[in-house]
């Protein structure tokens, strides 16, 4: 598991109120019980953590954790 995937999984797990080790890279973000307001906060936390700006559709609820981590990696290749 890449460092970015571990970090993103840990952040998502906090919002989903679950243990990061219980989440698979293939877990669909929208199926983790995160409401829309929390999803906005999650995107902001990721942006602050990596010093990046994600596109509005970067937080697609049908995306998996691995896909979100890949988006973060491709947005900030110097930081991840």
Image (tube, helix red, strand yellow):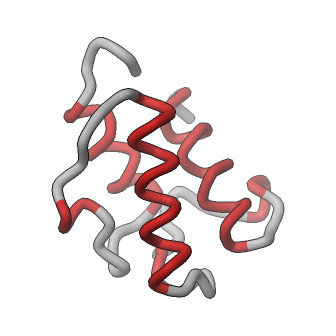
Q: Please determine whether, in this image, residue 54 is positioned above or below residue 25.
A: above
Q: Please determine whether, in this image, residue 13 is positioned above or below residue 31.
A: above
Please name whichever residue, 40 or 8, is drawn nearer the observer in this view of the structure: 40
Q: Position of residue 9 (x, y in %)?
A: 60, 51
Q: Please determine whether, in this image, residue 44 is positioned above or below residue 29.
A: above
Left or right of 3 in this view: 54: left
Left or right of 26 in this view: 24: right
- Residue 7: which quarter of the image? top right
Please name whichever residue, 47 or 58, is drawn nearer the observer in this view of the structure: 47
Left or right of 77 in this view: 16: right
Q: In which quarter of the image is the N terminus?
A: top right
Q: Quadrant of the C terminus?
A: top left
The outermost residue toward the top is 78
Q: Where is residue 60 in the image (x, y as percent from the top left)?
A: 29, 73
The outermost residue toward the right is 19
- Residue 76: which quarter of the image? top left
Left or right of 12 in this view: 46: left
Q: Please determine whether, in this image, residue 15 is positioned above or below residue 9.
A: below
Q: Where is residue 30 in the image (x, y as percent from the top left)?
A: 46, 83
What is the number of callouts on the image? 0
Residue shown at 34%/70% (left/top)? 63
Residue shown at 45%/84% (left/top)? 36
Q: Position of residue 52 (x, y in %)?
A: 29, 33
Residue shown at 17%/55% (left/top)? 55
Residue shown at 53%/57% (left/top)? 25
């Amino acid at each position: 598991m890449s460092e970015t995937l571990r970090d993103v999984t840990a952040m998502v797990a906090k919002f989903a109120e679950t243990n990061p080790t219980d989440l698979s890279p293939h877990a669909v973000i929208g199926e983790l019980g995160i409401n829309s307001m929390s999803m906005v906060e999650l995107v902001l936390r990721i942006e602050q953590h990596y010093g990046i700006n994600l596109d509005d559709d970067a937080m697609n609820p049908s995306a998996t954790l691995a896909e979100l981590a890949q988006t973060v990696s491709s947005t900030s290749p110097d930081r991840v």
